[in-house]
Image: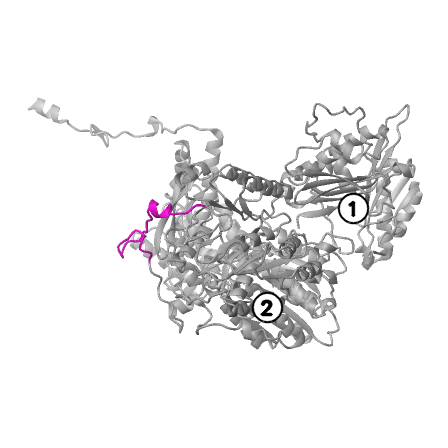
Amino acid sequence: MSAKAVREYDGKLLLAHWLHRTPIPATESAGSAPVSSTFIQPTTRLAHASFDTALLKADKAQFTQHVRSTLDQLEVVHPWLLTHKLVAKPDQLIKRRGKSGLLLLNADWAEARTWIEAHAAKDVLVDSVAGVLKTFLVEPFIPHPSNTEYYICINSDRDGDNILFTHEGGIEVGDVDAKALKLQVKVTDSFPTSTAIRSTLLVNVPESKQDVLIDFISRLYAVYIDLHFTYLEINPLVVLDPTEDEPARVYYLDLAAKLDQTAEFEAGPKWAIARAPQNLGIAGVAPTTSGADAGPQMEFPAPFGRELTKEEAYIQELDSKTGASLKLTILNKDGRIWTMVAGGGASVVYSDAIAALGQADELANYGEYSGAPTETQTYEYAKTILDLMTRSAVPHPEGKVLIIGGGIANFTNVASTFKGIVRALTEFKQPLIAHKVRIFVRRGGPNYQEGLRSMRQLGESLGVEIQVFGPETHITEIVPLALTGKSSDNLNAVIGNTSGASSGNLLQDQLLGSNVNTPAPTTPSSRVATPAQERMTYFSEADAQRTAGHDNNIPFTAHTRSFVYGMQPRAVQGMLDFDFICKREVPSVAAMIYPFGGAHVQKFYWGTKETLLSVYTTLEEATAKFPEVDTVVNFASCRSVYQSTMDIFKHSEQIKTVAIIAEGVPERRARQILWEAKQRNVLVIGPATVGGIKPGCFKIGNTGGMMDNIVSSKLYRAGSVAYVSKSGGMSNELNNIISRTTDGVYEGVAIGGDRYPGSTFIDHMLRYENDPNCKMLVLLGEVGGVEEYKVCEAVKNGTIRKPVIAWCIGTCAKMFATEVQFGHAGALAQSDLETADAKNKALRAAGIIVPETFEKLPLVLNQTFQTMVKQGIIQLKPEPETPKIPIDYSWAQELGLVRKPASFVSTICDDRGQELLYAGMRISDVFKEDIGIGGVLSLLWFKRRLPDYACKFIEMVLMLTADHGPAVSGAHNTIVTARAGKDLVSSLCAGLLTIGDRFGGALDGAAEQFSSAYDKSLTPREFVSVMRKQNKLILGIGHKIKSRTNPDLRVEIIKEYAKKHFPSTPVLDYALQVENITTSKKDNLILNVDGAIGILFVDLLRNSGAFTREEAEEYIKIGTLNGLFVLGRSIGFIGHYLDQKRLKQGLYRHPWDDISYLTPGNELGRTVASLASINKKA
């Protein structure tokens, strides 16, 4: 939902800060009378108190103390509370508080405090809605006579903004629509002048107050526009009479407001700064920041009586952290019917179906998961619902029902999505059995067969009844099956009609064969011929420009070409695949527009071959190159789509259709777009749309989903039925239903679920009426808005004569006691006229065919179609060959239809899922269990968790080997390379390349020598003698500086640690005996740090119990131990690099006096005769 209510406190803070800061557009004409009196902003005095009612569950006395301490703090922060007469009231989006006795007037602070304490956490019933009072607003009382109370309201509709004003405001304002004066400011109008305000709104206001009201209304409307309000009501608006000492003063006493949440990227900083502590009228508060703006983010509270539960808040938090959509509203925690539905539109029709069977009071929740959530997100969502469903201590006597439903997905891999649900169901096996839960599943879309198979198998293993259905079953047919045990009347005979035998998986059928005849599509003769072995396909410009001009009634044909705005290779490939199976002569996408990447070409598939599409940075270049293009599919984000669309409109002489895909376009920008399009005679589809499809001709973006959806709904050839829907997800269902009950879709458009779509139902219905190839019309509306009534009028007055079948979803809304926002921004009834029931009744009264329920839609479709066939209005045509689907290798592999050997094998890490895995351990668990660097190394190097002492030893080794001064060869090389101006990686590599047997790399060698001697049972003296006879150095023995009398403390530290924590150290004990022998000959032949580390690692590998003897030996042989030195010393090398860069050291040149120059004339101290001297002597 885009328009969201805010607290009165926040609304007043916005006005207090911005009424005098927002500029008023200069629109006064020469004949306008000047405004002599200006609005004076009252001092901001607003005190807000919010109480945590959760404390009541723990201790009532604790809550009482919490209320008192909060009010104590309030009077400290707002000292004016102690000196003014006050007004106190709840601030929880409650309407008509005065009539409900929830308003305290003209009280001092002691009275106000007592009143708040009495009402805090109190259960109240307001207009049949029950709720708990926990948020209060206190402000100064403004004494005034009743005749100074006015009423003003600004609201918005498709045509513009409406300013309503009446001089009879206050608690008894009555029917505002009937009595208020109205000034309409159309989207294309300029800002209203003072003359217009005076003459239209203020005719009943004393002249002495008119000027100040003109100034106030002008400022109020400027703020309304600038801060993206969608609704703003003040009642009463008090205007005190002017006196000799003071001008007329304006006070806004009670306020209700809604903001456009989707405009937060534009107005969010302004909302935040108005609510910053320094702007709240609190003395001595220093400026602070919160989040990205200079103040806290705007809060949008839940409607009164619909406070978020812990579970709802959790799902809301999950939703905020993902690009998917996760929604949950708990309606009745004790209900026996629970739903887990994929898709916004689908979630509404399932609730409708439950309500239609008289089970609305048993419906426990409303919600949806869509937008391809990950396995983990789906698991968390399902787990939350299952926990709520099975939480009650006493099972429901009739058992419970879980409906896992959804429409036909576009691209979501249904099997992958179901993995999270299967995981949650498995976890709740016993509670599901205890509560006698029956599960009904219906889903369609990519890989749905595998998903349904996994759910069916789960039912067998869990011992829980799970019934599964695919797209051959009507979307909501599982509801009557679950609740009544039988299906809808005469439905299966209609929707179950399918021709041919197949596995249900079109891709599998075509790869592996089936009984369905699917000959390969022929290549159009006009396409440039290419040899069979040629990978590329080319198209001639003559073919591309073969078009007969643009017809507003038929915007899409087999020759329609388009630009795709934005880098959307997946959508473009989908459009090209559709073109190919429809046997178009040229691709429907002429080029892509991408302002950020520079002009280039992108490679795509045309069937099984490849072709190239140009990418331009500007629309000017593209339109000049492709004058035949008349359609743009705009994938720009909600932040940039307004400007990009306005730029597209500059080419309206050529571009006649624009599809806007982005969701979350601010309502004011959407209205500006639709009115600009109307003036330029451009058809706009969207915003917030999946697009539309003209079978056999043209597909907008991702409409229809993957190719198996396209083929199963026979969208590769034209039918006779055209539809228009608000929901993009439900358009897939309409494709499926229409293809199964009629001869198929002629054209389908999803206008988008936002409040102000660029084109409406009537725009497309009139097109279909004027298209002779379209025989039958289908409208799928929904709760919210009034656009369906225009279709009613067109049918009643004879403008539309073709048969129309219609249904508005959202009929369940009347069953809910509190306001429920359905899937789309526009799916909320603002009045009785906007309810789904009222629309369906009006559509039926107009002569439109309206089924009893949505479940009966396929039946009436089939009946109407059969009647038209009998009348000869529709001529049945032979079914063309089913085209082969070009399938990407990656998708075929995901479906398990092909296989190939992997180029690499990895056993230590997996980055494919929701969470990175180290040797099977989730990265979140790595931090939860605080395993440290040693633990991570044990996972990635040894593929297992080592004991804590072993992980600590690894960390000690890294610390000990991190550095040993700048003089060692590796550090020296790093320093020299850094001073030569090389980068970090080059300098580090220069140092690492010196590591070997002579420097640092003796760990593996020492481990191998000592362990081998120990295993051969050589005495330490025999080992030393053998090495001396073989003229080999004992690796790990000897140090240039350290000696027995000056021991290396690094060695002492790890020796002591190993003796204390290792189970045993036999190889170390052996090495120390060798050291006794070597140091008796020379004092510095001690066990050095390389040898100690290598030897102790042998003891660790062999005796920790984590490795077999064979594994331990393998790790020694493959260089694992030297890896420790490389890893540790890299820390020091990087330190030296950074040190040299920080010191800005110049190029290093070694000094001459540190080099012995042994030239040919002076080698080894001997004089060598030169050839010249020898000749001279001769």
Tell whether position 1169 is magenta: no
Is residue 806 left or right of 236 when viewed as pictured?
Answer: left
Where is residue 244, by image quadrant? top right
x and y percentages locating residue 518 in the rendered image: 38, 67
Question: Looking at the magenta stretch, what is its main secondary structure?
Answer: loop
Q: Nearer the viewer, residue 541 or 574?
A: 541
x and y percentages locating residue 385 in the rendered image: 66, 64
> Which quadrant is the C terminus positioned in?
top left
- How many marks are shown on the rendered structure? 2
Residue 882 shows in this picture: yes
The stretch in magenta equals: 523-549
Is residue 992 left or right of 176 when viewed as pictured?
Answer: left
Element marked by disc 2: helix
The tag on residue 177 is 1
For residue 1050, above or below residue 364: above
x and y percentages locating residue 717 in the rendered image: 44, 61
Tell whether position 538 is magenta: yes
Residue beneath label 2, please?
A: 860
Residue density around tag 1, few if under 14, some if 14–19, many if 20 or more, within 10 Å? few
Q: Amino acid at mark 2?
A: Val
